[in-house]
Amino acid sequence: MTRVLSRDGVRPTNSQKLCMRTMLRSLIGEIDFNRLCLGIEIGTLDEDALQIVVPAENCAADIKLHHSDDFAVAAEYAIGRPIRTVSVLSADQLLRFPLCNKPMLSSYNVREWDGPAALQP
């Protein structure tokens, strides 16, 4: 599969994204998939960290608390590289913080993230 380089890392191809969605649907179930993954964007892959952008903060919190391992497994399967960290951001957070802070935001481990207050310098 061809990888497309972005400014911050590797972006998964469309076929890799489709494979991830199919795997996620089977891992988390149809109901949770439809609730959490509607409007989801798979961001970049920096070494072993995957960035995911979801439309709402409540979806980001739910994924962070209950499904980050499922996202990592699906990404590992689809992309073929080990994923150790899954960073989940809501679209609201991207509006509050400029994109120039993106490397700082993408470095947080989902399981250790303390909310928007943790992103303050």
Image (cartoon, helix red, strand yellow):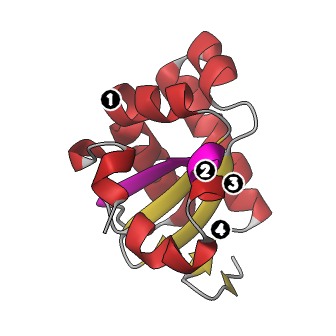
x, y percent for residue 103: 45, 77
Q: Earlier in the sequence, mark 1 or mark 2?
A: 2
Query: For mark 2, does the 10 Å Cα neighbourhood hold few (<14), some (14 to 19), or many (20 or more) residues?
Result: many
Cβ atoms under marks 4 and 1 closer than 8 Å: no
Indicate the amino acid at tag 4: Pro
User: Gap in Å between the C-alphas at discs 1 and 2?
Assistant: 15 Å
Indicate the amino acid at tag 2: Val
Indicate the amino acid at tag 3: Lys
Q: Nearer the viewer, mark 2 or mark 4?
A: 2
Identify which residue, 43 or 97, lies in the foreground: 97
Residue identifier under label 1: 65
User: Gap in Å between the C-alphas at discs 2 and 3?
Assistant: 13 Å
User: What residue is drawn where x is 34% and y is 40%?
Assistant: 69
Q: Earlier in the sequence, mark 3 or mark 4?
A: 4
Query: In the visual, does 121 lie left or right of 11?
Result: left
Residue identifier under label 2: 53
x, y percent for residue 112: 21, 47
SS at circle 3: helix
Q: Main secondary structure of the magenta part?
A: strand
Query: For mark 1, does the 10 Å Cα neighbourhood hold few (<14), some (14 to 19), or many (20 or more) residues?
Result: some
* Residue 82 drawn above or below residue 77: below
Q: Earlier in the sequence, mark 2 or mark 4?
A: 4
Residue identifier under label 4: 12
Region in magenta? 84-93
